[in-house]
Image: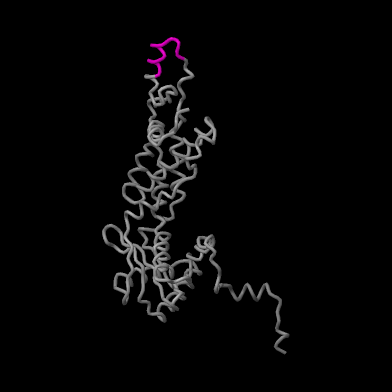
Amino acid sequence: MPHLSEALLDSIIFSMEDQVTSYFIDLKDEQLISEDEMRYILEEDEHESSSRFLPIPDWTPADGFRLMEKFVSKIRNPRVQENLIRALESGKGVFRKFKDELAQEPILERKWYSFKDEQLKRVVVSWYRELEGALTLEHLDPEPVEYAEDILLEDFSYDIYEGPLTDEMDALIQATLVEMSEGSEEDRIGALLLSRRLECDRTEHALIARACDDSLAAILLYIPLTERVVHVPFFTVAKPYRGLGLFRLLFDAFSRQMARFHYTKMIVNLAGESVSLEKYFSPYKARNATKQLTLSTESWNLMHPSLEGAFL
């Protein structure tokens, strides 16, 4: 087996998507050739064996469709996900409709091509491992890379802001609170708690993310409590930029900046749907300093034995 160089890997991936021509690896010349080229070599040299040529992995339209479904399942923006699901369910011309829909979301479109490239690399590397054995491929990483981060770093800028909140910042904060107040009961309670906290704490420190068009894409408010402890009472990502992994990059930028300012502890406030982010922080040895729960009086009164006798 020839060395699986980046050039050969890219050639195999490109050829796998060609639904017209079949391709083979020429084990003697260590290059990729078409089926017609292989037949020519075999006809020219009657002593040459077909074992010299190794067919590359199959990649059918069905495989491509399943990959699109996998990508769409990872999108967290409901509107974009719904539009892409509709494109996948449209029947004839599904691949074109999927691409047309993605073209309306340039950042997500670049994520798709990076995602597809990484998934195809995994297919090729796994196939190569089976044929050649793992020892000769130790230099290759079979796991997918974080394809989103480089793309997001290109499309957003991150800045520390100090001073009273601008109208633009306040508009994004209020839009998030209104959205929460129209959601589930837990979201409504979360909006109430956040509103009261923001009224009490006049925050004048923020980390913001801006998109290429200079629009405000995300904001993270923070309050220095001591020389070593900083509190994050509120953060949000604007609707058009959700589901892209922007919060993770924003928080990463925040944590590294705080370390430069010599803060050693961060307290993060979670409310509403963001409570689900607790599992995101847990791998980094996050611990609960305090925790707020919601429960109904009805469930307590119906399920817990009455202790009225304690008041006699």
- The correct choice, above or below, for 109 with respect to 200 in the image is above
Extreme residue in the left direction: 213
* Most foreground residue, 27 or 10: 27
Q: Is residue 41 magenta?
A: yes
Magenta segment, prevailing SS (helix, strand or loop): helix
Q: Position of residue 236 (x, y in %)?
A: 40, 66
The residue that appears at 38% across and 23% down in the rendered structure is 34
Quadrant where the C terminus lies? bottom right
Nearer to me, 17 or 89: 17
Residue 181 visible in the displayed image: yes
Residue 244 position within the rendered picture, expressed as x and y whole percent measured from the top left: 40, 55
Q: Give the number of callouts.
A: 0
Residue closer to the observer: 7 or 204? 7
Q: How is the rendered protein coloured?
A: one colour
8 falls in the magenta region = no
Magenta-drawn segment: 38-48
Which quarter of the picture shows residue 178?
Answer: bottom left
Q: Is residue 43 above or below residue 159?
A: above
In the rendered image, residue 297, in percent from the top left (x then y), is placed at 60, 76
The residue at 49%/63% (across/down) is 277
Which of the two residues, 226 or 12, is positioned nearer the viewer here?
226
**Residue 96 falls left or right of residue 126:** left
Examine the image and state in which quarter residue 204 appears. Answer: bottom left
Instruction: Please say if 140 is above or below 303.
Output: above
